Image (spheres, grey):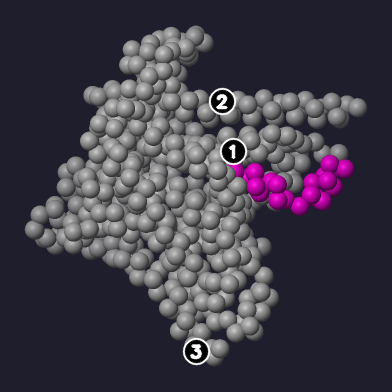
Amino acid sequence: MPAAARNRVVYFLIAPAVLILALTSLYPAVYSLVLSFFNWNWGNRFDFIGLANYIDLFSSAEFWQVLYQTFLFAVAATSLELVLGIGLAVVVDRLQFGASVIRTLLLTPLMVSGIIVALMSKIVLDPMLGIVNYALGLLGLPPSPFFGATSTAMATVIMVDAWWQTAFVFIIVLAGLQSLPQEPIEAARVDGAGSLQTFFRVKLPMLRPVLFTVLIFRTIDTLKVFDIIFGTTGGGPQIATEVMQTMAYRKAFSFLQMSEAMTVMVIFSVIVLAISLIYMRLEERMEAD
Amino acid sequence: MRNTRREQLERLLAYLISLAAILLTLFPILWLLSVALKSQRDAFALPPKLLFQPIADHFLALLDRPGFVEAFLNSVYVTALGVSIAIIIAIFTAYGIHRFRFRGQKLFGVWLLLAYMLPEFLFIIPMFALFQRIGWYDTHIGLALVYQVHSLPFAVWLIRSFFKEVPGELDDASKIDGCNHLGALRHVYIPMAAPGIAATAILTAIWIWNELTIALSLTFAEAQTITVAVASFRGYTSINWGQMSAASIVAVAPMLCFAVIAQKYIVKGLTLGSLKG
């Protein structure tokens, strides 16, 4: 087949994907960017107001608090999930029998929708009627208000996210561990290294690319958190658990401040995409090493 | 031997930790199931009633709840539609990326990844405005289409990594046999990567079935999905735990069955996609 024809074939092959993605990602991104310079409130008025939306946001304390909380949630949840997921993978990797059943059971949270995880946690963690506070009482520990107080709500949604997504880290790290070459591990063991030493000195460095991929996915996913918070606290009490996506939802669909909501998302998308691009660069560099 | 003794202890500890993790994982789900089967009085009882007379009332009440059964069927339909669109288009796209070098290829790859990473509300609000105008708001096709922002890049990425595993000689052989590109795709790539494509379809289906954010904003009544119907139980005033739990169980049951049946595919899809990039 001549080379020129080949080129034409490929454009036919990817055209449907390009069209769909243009409509569903490029068009809305441009639309949001343009509308962020107007004051559209779901009516017929479109007045150009320049950077006013951006200036309003950047000078509101609420915006900075919500941005801070978004990162707090993402960093805390991702770290917790990585530590627990890696730990669990190492443990299950050592099992001799029953490992596949155990793996299946530990995967169940990934099958559960975020909104169901949210409602479930509201039942289990209810301050008055919840089983967890009852169990804490039996152990002689004080009850917690969980979602109900500004001081504990954020920690609680982070915990709930960890219950939900640790399995993702676990399954990928486990697969990574099981596909490691055996020779360096054996060599370390022959040299008298214990299992902890082997893990930190030999296995963990070899797992670096896998861990990096997991880190990217969890970071982006937790930055974009919505359903867990929407279903439990709705961003409250006051705005103690409000994050960028719940803020945009509230502005757009409760207050019909469409332009303001789009401004929030434009700023946030720039942040998320910048982080994604930095990660991609780092990954390329790692692969080049 | 001291060493084996120590290894035995470590193994015992590993089983104990695994057991604890399983309990922690399954407990909330089993608790939810128990609340769905309890009367209101039993559900609120403290100390909790471990032995109780299970009742089906909450599940039966869901049948009378306006729109609930329809929401379940809507989810079935939107999932089937969304998965079909994603998989069919992704097969051609993945083949294109895998088999050719073309101008803008790198840019296209970055675009796929960035589209996948986009925060939902960046595209939800404009799509909401657009769909209101053209009459696609609250329709199955509108929702399935917007799901492609996430599902299509995911499917392309995964199917491409499965195509990479197809030996190049087979492709060349098919060319010699006079196959064109569609022939190679049909006779070599799709059959060889079938388990991988199945894994991709399953993971896409799970994602769409469980998705809330987009469905909440782009559907209302006609195309309302099961997650939106379940979300309507949220709120501090109506503590109808029994029905809320029953609805959640109904929504999660198909995915749990799926997990048991297709476990091998799910693990394959999740791990291959991340291990090979």
Which circle marks residue B23 in the picture?
2
Look at mark 1 in the image and give the residue it sits on.
Answer: A104
Looking at the rendering, in which quadrant would you find the N terminus of chain A? bottom right
Whether marks 3 and 2 lie on the same chain: no
Look at discs 1 and 3 and give the one toward the viewer. Answer: 1
Q: Amino acid at mark 1?
A: Thr
Residue B226, position as x, y percentages in the image: 33, 41
- Please tell me which of labels 1 and 3 falls first in the chain: 3
Start-end of magenta stretch: A171-191
Q: Chain of mark 1?
A: A
Location of residue B229 by image quarter = top left
Categorize mark 1 by other alpha carbons within 10 Å: few (<14), some (14-19), many (20+).
Answer: some
- Distance between the Cα atoms at labels 1 and 3? 49 Å
Callouts 2 and 1 on one subunit = no
Tell me the element at label 2.
helix
Question: Which residue is identified by label 3?
Answer: A4
x and y, in percent, of residue A9 in the image? 47, 81
